[in-house]
Image (cartoon, helix red, strand yellow):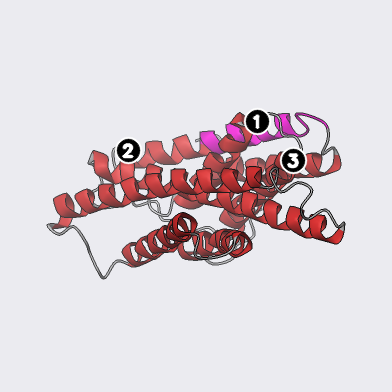
Amino acid sequence: MLISPKILLFGAAVFYCLSFFAAVIWARRNGAGRYFLYAGLLLNATAVVLRYRLAWPMLPMYFGSAVLPLVLGAMAACSRPPSGEGIRVRQRVLALVAILMAAAIVFPKDFYIPFIKSRILPAHLFFWFGEVGKACFLVAGAWATVELRWKKEASENGRGGARQEGAAVPHLHYMRWTVWGFALWTFSMFSGEIWSYLGWGTPVVWDDPTITTTMATWFFYICLLHLHLTGSWSARSRNLYAAAGVVVVIGLNCLPNLGPFRWPL
């Protein structure tokens, strides 16, 4: 192989960082850093295809650390040109993409042996729908932090009630992303149970830590949806809860895919 996936991922991380810095420096310019983002996505996607090709038709192990930045970056690339609060959300999403990609490079968990008994479709559905669901949760957290910051600025400027109607817009955005993420995450869980039943004869393998972290994340977000539907907490408390979801998703579902520190060069 002329170019290894590690080199491609390193190049993707560089372009992701450039895209983030461009989005911060030229925040009001539509498409700032977009071509850097496209270049990073191309390198990232190539590395993913190469890794997948090595394991096909089985599923690569500890593959999510390289796929999640790709999915999250693709969401940022496919979004409409940001304006207003969307600019801040885009900056946060690009920051997450760069951080996650950098972490995948300097903390690699290089197991090139594929998952056992993963030659069936539910195994691949479990993985891909789970990664897209995680990306939706992270975008929801970005929207939640933007609304929290806007409310703080409005309160400091004495405009707390002036844009009460407009303040609901980012709130609806973060709940939409949460609903999409929850639906995809639920589908991923059921696909994983089918995979577990077909492979090991039981829908739940309780000694697998992935089951524990997946279910913990599911319960975290079903609580958020419950709080939203019942109105039990204030809007600010629900914002804080949704923003904390970024820590939950990364801590429970991203950190286990990382290994010991290794200098990439």
| 262 and 221: which is toward the camera | 221
Residue 135: in sight, yes or no?
A: no
Q: Residues within 10 Å of mark 3 (few under 14, many from 20)?
A: some
Image position of 199 (left or right of 39): left
Secondary structure of residue under mark 3: helix
Q: Where does residue 103 sit, x and y in percent of width and height?
A: 60, 57
Image position of 225 (left or right of 96): left
Q: Which residue type does callout 2 highlight? A: Trp
Secondary structure that dominates the magenta span: helix
Q: CA distance from mark 1 to mark 2?
A: 26 Å
Which of the numbered marks, if any, corresponds to residue 56? 2
Q: Please tell me which of labels 1 and 3 falls first in the chain.
A: 1
Q: Which is more foreground, mark 1 or mark 2?
A: 1
Q: Where does residue 34 sit, x and y in percent of width and height?
A: 71, 31
Which of the numbered marks, if any, corresponds to residue 38? 1
State yes or no: residue 33 in magenta.
yes
Q: Which residue type does callout 3 highlight? A: Ile
Chain part drawn in magenta: 29-46
Q: Which residue type does callout 1 highlight? A: Tyr
| 106 and 184: which is toward the camera | 184
The number of callouts visible is 3
Which of the numbered marks, if any, corresponds to residue 87? 3
